[in-house]
């Protein structure tokens, strides 16, 4: 979306955009101090099934309330002083919001599956110079923050103070306007309370309206509203976050949590020790499916880039070896 | 004490042209004055309103020019003297009534002053209002000097009463806004009491009778004009060239002849009564020369009418060479000035004289640019319209359907230019944005997939947009109307209107509530503060998604100039010099290159933005547009 005329060839918009060129290797070195080698779900320390201990949070959260529980804990324990989350207007338009009190967290619970300007709120703050900030975002939002961190432009952003990033699993996001228009017509104009996409094999968009009715919308019906740019995204599991959170196929009320950084590990273990969350090992079958799904997204993106002739010197800078592995291993997984 | 109420007959006093017109009306005993403001006419009613209480007049700012003419006419019908004043566009609005009033006739002296704006210095069009006099068969006077402006106005009331017709006076910017001396006349002592004679209805019917009567009246008028002291000839008995002029052209001609030193070669026919033509007076002087050069502003009104008249009287007058706009000796658009007139006369008389280099305008502009930076027309610092257009721009971009914004008349017309981020795509007459939106709002049936919006000021809303809104509701047109309510008729000088809670004469007035009015029509109405950029943007965006019927969003925030007189700044605004990182930001100077409030400055020394504290009005909007949050607003 172009808001204003601009004559800068490469300004900050260009440098920070998650859909302009990305050097994954350089970012991994900066963020984790490691080489990018795990092509399935990115670098990780452990993967578990987690849920909030509080039944209230479990009820009000999107799946298991784990993100809300972790954020409340991080705020109370002063891992962070404020969090940038996404809340939705009554019309489900996503928007960034700065939260400073644990009680406010639930105002941002739930998903609308629509891409939103969350990071605008991060940038606008306002923040004091000593505040530590947590952000919950989609893979592209996490990538944008990491690009800011490695930005070649003068270091002028808040990235030194963004200490905790919780990334969400994401297959794609939808374009707001046509999606909402379609959805409103689909539920006969009823007021929409909650949206939830169920994992395979069901793969339904469950639309829960204020009158308590649940409408099942097959995913294929909303595919036309998928943002074009999602087609070149390689990241399903927010590989550059401290903690990644997504659903668990076939097990209701639990989230998959991938721990990636030392900080993520510390928060998760302390929250569990404090009884804020509870965890279980992720069944091997689920872990396998997770990796396959993640690889498939990568393969689709790489294939799309290849078709467009943008693989060499285009969107991603990645070694031929890794690209080859993505294409071949994903193929195996698919078969 | 105002010069308008000074009771010192014979005293020479300095007047603005429009004040002289007002003084002439007072000397004539005017009791009722009404107008809708419009440059260059606004000072007539503006100055009358200041002495209304003292002199016992009724003066009002009316909702539009037609109503103003009707209010003044009511005075005439009741036997009082009435005056209305307007700009050229205003006469178009009032003309429907005027084209019936000419037939019905008037009683008490009724004067309609129209101030034309040659070169459209503050107008959307360049219109010569004089053909209206010919179309309506009404007397037309054109003053050339400030003294004449006063004297003609005074006489116009007598003429109007004698003929039983409203009398038109045409002024132009260079007379209305010029200053000069005029000798004061007496102030009237007695004023009649209004009374309508109900036994004699005042109607245009039967038209065949009243139309004929109108033609008889205009013949009588012509007889009066033959002897009018406002028409004169100056020059030799057998000039080589006859100059026919009116209005400020008279002064330009005098200056041109003096500069060229050809006063003995050219004669001047100066007309003050320009319709109907004083034919005998003209024959007498047109005989003097075979070459005639017409000097007048905007259209060739005298030129064409006198040519037509000469054609009828060729046997008597002989064959003439006519020079003027048709012969391209004078420009057919824009203002004239002594230079233009000098060049025209010089060419005809073959005199060598260089009044001023033909490159002067360009050279002057270049010289000025050495000291004054080029400036785009823009909104004032802290103007709510800038904030509105910012939100509108973003909402339309978010919507992504290439929405059409239909504009209207007011400061916010600048929305067509970079000041308003070039959001507005049409601008015609008062209320036409809403009217056009009515049409566009019906075209979805033919496949139009762009959302339709219109912007309309508060004063414009009362003036002409309400019928369009009623039409939209009734015919189910689908558009979003943004009423940019800055609680002022700002562009013409802050005259009160039905939303301001004041009248021309000062006392408090009931406010005509825009949202209540719109709600009563059954339209969906929201009110927002444009200084809350996010909230406004959301509201516009959400309303654009509503594809059912007409929606009204009132964006209310007082005009920055009015607010500055009344209260201190809302915020103390500053740029945090640590946070602003100048060109390194990548925002490409969003504050000073795009948002461009004059209160923001780019400091080339530091390469960062700063607030110009002398200009900033503290609205705080820029704090919300800085992507780096470097502009800070602190409540004061």
Image: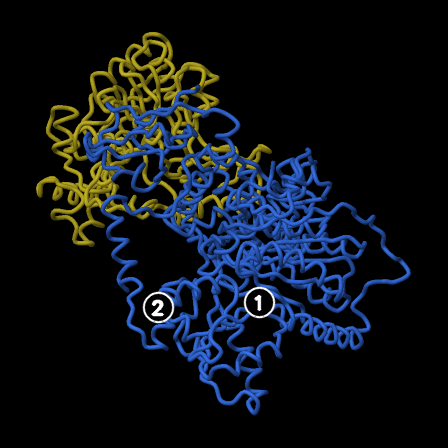
Chain colours: A yellow, B blue
Quadrant housing the C terminus of chain B: top left
Q: Is residue A292 left or right of residue B449?
A: left
Q: Residue furthest top?
A: A274
**Which numbered marker is on residue A207?**
none
Q: Between B590 and B239, which is closer to the camera in this rendering?
A: B239
Q: Secondary structure at mark 2?
A: helix
In the image, what residue occupies the spot 79% across and 57% down? B77
Residue under pointer 1:
B130
Percent of width and height locating residue B227: 65, 71
Question: Badge 2 sits on which subunit?
Answer: B
Percent of width and height locating residue B518: 65, 44
Q: Is residue B231 left or right of residue A144?
A: right
In the image, what residue occupies the spot 17% across and 39% down? A22
- Mark 1: few/some/many CA within 10 Å (<14, 14-19, 20+): many
| Quarter of the figure with residue A247 | top left
Q: Is residue B498 above or below residue B21?
A: above
Q: Residue furthest right?
A: B199
Q: Secondary structure at mark 1?
A: loop
Residue under pointer 2:
B260
Asked if the residue under mark 2 is in contact with the one under mark 1, i.e. CB atoms within 8 Å, the reply is: no
Percent of width and height locating residue B527: 57, 36
In the image, what residue occupies the spot 34% across and 46% down? A227
Q: Residue furthest bottom?
A: B315
Is residue A92 visible in the rendered structure shown here?
Answer: yes
Q: Between B28 and B377, which is closer to the camera in this rendering?
A: B28
| Quarter of the figure with residue A110 | top left
Question: Badge 1 sits on which subunit?
Answer: B
> Mark 1 vs mark 2: which is more N-terminal?
1
Q: Is residue B243 above or below residue A248?
A: below
């Amino acid at each position: 979306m172009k808001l204003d005329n601009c004559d800068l060839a490469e300004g900050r918009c260009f440098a920070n955009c998650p859909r302009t060129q990305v050097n994954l290797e350089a970012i991994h070195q900066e963020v984790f101090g490691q080489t990018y080698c795990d092509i399935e779900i990115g670098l990780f320390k452990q993967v578990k099934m987690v849920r909030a201990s509080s039944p209230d949070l479990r009820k009000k959260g999107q799946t298991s309330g784990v993100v809300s529980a972790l954020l409340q804990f991080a705020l109370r324990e002063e891992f962070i002083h404020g969090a940038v989350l996404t809340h939705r207007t009554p019309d489900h338009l996503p928007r960034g919001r700065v939260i400073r009190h644990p009680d406010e967290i639930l105002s941002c619970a739930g998903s609308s599956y629509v891409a939103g300007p969350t990071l605008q709120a991060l940038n606008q703050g306002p923040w004091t110079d000593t505040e530590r900030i947590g952000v919950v975002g989609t893979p592209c939002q996490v990538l944008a923050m990491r690009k800011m961190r490695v930005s070649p432009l003068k270091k002028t952003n808040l990235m030194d103070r963004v200490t905790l990033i919780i990334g969400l699993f994401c297959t794609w996001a939808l374009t707001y306007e046509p999606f909402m228009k379609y959805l409103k017509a689909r539920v006969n104009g009823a007021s929409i309370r909650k949206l939830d996409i169920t994992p395979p094999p069901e793969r339904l968009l469950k639309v829960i309206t204020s009158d308590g009715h649940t409408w099942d919308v097959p995913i294929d019906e909303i595919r036309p509203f998928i943002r074009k740019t999602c087609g070149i995204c390689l990241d399903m599991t927010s590989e550059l976050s401290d903690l990644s959170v997504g659903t668990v196929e076939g097990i209701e009320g639990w989230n998959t949590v991938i721990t990636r950084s030392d900080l993520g590990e510390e928060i998760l273990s302390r929250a569990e020790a404090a009884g804020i969350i509870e965890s279980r090992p992720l069944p091997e079958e689920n872990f396998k499916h997770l990796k396959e799904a993640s690889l498939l997204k990568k393969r689709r993106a790489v294939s799309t880039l290849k078709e467009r002739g943008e693989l060499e010197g285009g969107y991603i800078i990645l070694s031929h070896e890794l690209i080859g592995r993505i294409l071949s291993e994903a193929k195996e997984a698919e078969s | 004490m105002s010069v308008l109420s000074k009771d010192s007959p014979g005293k020479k006093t300095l007047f603005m042209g429009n004040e002289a017109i007002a003084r002439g009306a007072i000397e004539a005993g005017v009791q009722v004055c009404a107008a809708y403001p419009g440059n260059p006419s606004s000072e007539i009613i503006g100055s009358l309103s200041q002495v209304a209480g003292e002199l016992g007049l009724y003066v009002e700012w009316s909702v539009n020019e037609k109503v103003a003419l009707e209010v003044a006419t009511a005075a005439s019908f009741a036997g009082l003297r009435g005056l209305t004043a307007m700009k050229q566009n205003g006469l178009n609005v009032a003309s429907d009534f005027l084209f019936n009033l000419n037939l019905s006739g008037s009683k008490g002296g009724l004067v309609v002053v129209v101030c034309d704006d040659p070169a459209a210095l503050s107008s959307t069009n360049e219109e010569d209002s004089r053909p209206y006099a010919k179309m309506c068969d009404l007397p037309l006077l054109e003053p050339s000097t400030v003294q004449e402006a006063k004297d003609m106005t005074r006489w116009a009331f007598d003429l109007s009463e004698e003929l039983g017709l409203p009398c038109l006076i045409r002024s132009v910017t260079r007379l209305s806004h010029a200053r000069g001396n005029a000798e004061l006349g007496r102030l009237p002592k007695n004023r009649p009491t209004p009374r309508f004679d109900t036994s004699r209805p005042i109607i245009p019917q039967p038209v065949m009778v009243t139309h004929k009567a109108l033609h008889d009246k205009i013949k009588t008028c012509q007889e009066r004009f033959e002897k009018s002291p406002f028409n004169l000839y100056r020059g030799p008995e057998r000039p080589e060239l006859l100059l026919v002029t009116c209005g400020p052209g008279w002064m330009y001609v005098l200056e041109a002849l003096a500069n060229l030193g050809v006063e003995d070669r050219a004669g001047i026919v100066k007309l003050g009564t320009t319709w109907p033509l004083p034919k005998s007076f003209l024959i007498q002087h047109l005989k003097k020369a075979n070459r005639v050069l017409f000097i007048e502003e905007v259209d060739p009104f005298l030129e064409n009418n006198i040519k037509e008249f000469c054609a009828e009287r060729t046997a008597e007058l002989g064959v003439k060479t006519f020079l003027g706009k048709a012969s391209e000796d004078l420009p057919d658009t824009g203002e004239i000035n002594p230079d233009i007139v000098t060049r025209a006369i010089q060419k005809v008389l073959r005199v060598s004289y260089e009044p001023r280099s033909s490159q002067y305008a360009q050279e002057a502009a270049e010289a000025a640019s050495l000291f004054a930076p080029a400036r785009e027309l823009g909104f004032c610092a802290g103007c709510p319209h800038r904030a509105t257009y910012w939100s509108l721009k973003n909402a339309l971009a978010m919507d992504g359907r290439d929405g059409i914004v239909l504009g209207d008349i007011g400061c916010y017309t600048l929305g067509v230019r970079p000041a308003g981020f070039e959001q507005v795509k049409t601008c015609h007459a008062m209320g036409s944005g809403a009217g056009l939106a009515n049409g566009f709002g019906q075209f979805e049936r033919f496949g139009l997939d762009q959302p339709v919006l219109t912007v309309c000021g508060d004063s414009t809303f009362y003036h002409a947009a309400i019928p369009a809104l009623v039409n939209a509701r009734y015919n189910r047109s689908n558009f979003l109307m943004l009423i940019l309510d800055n609680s002022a008729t700002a562009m013409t000088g802050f005259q009160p209107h039905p939303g301001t809670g004041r009248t021309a004469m000062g006392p408090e007035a009931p406010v005509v509530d825009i949202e209540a009015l719109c709600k009563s029509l059954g339209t969906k109405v929201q009110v927002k503060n444009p200084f809350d950029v996010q909230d406004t943007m959301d509201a516009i965006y959400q309303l654009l998604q509503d594809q059912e019927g007409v929606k009204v969003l009132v964006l209310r925030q007082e005009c920055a100039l009015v607010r500055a007189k009344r209260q201190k700044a809302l915020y103390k605004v500053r740029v945090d010099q640590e946070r602003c990182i100048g060109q390194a930001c990548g925002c490409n100077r969003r504050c000073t290159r795009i948002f461009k409030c004059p209160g923001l400055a780019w400091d080339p020394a530091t390469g960062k933005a700063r607030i110009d504290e002398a200009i900033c009005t503290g609205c705080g909007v820029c704090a919300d547009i800085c992507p780096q949050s470097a502009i800070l607003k602190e409540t004061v």
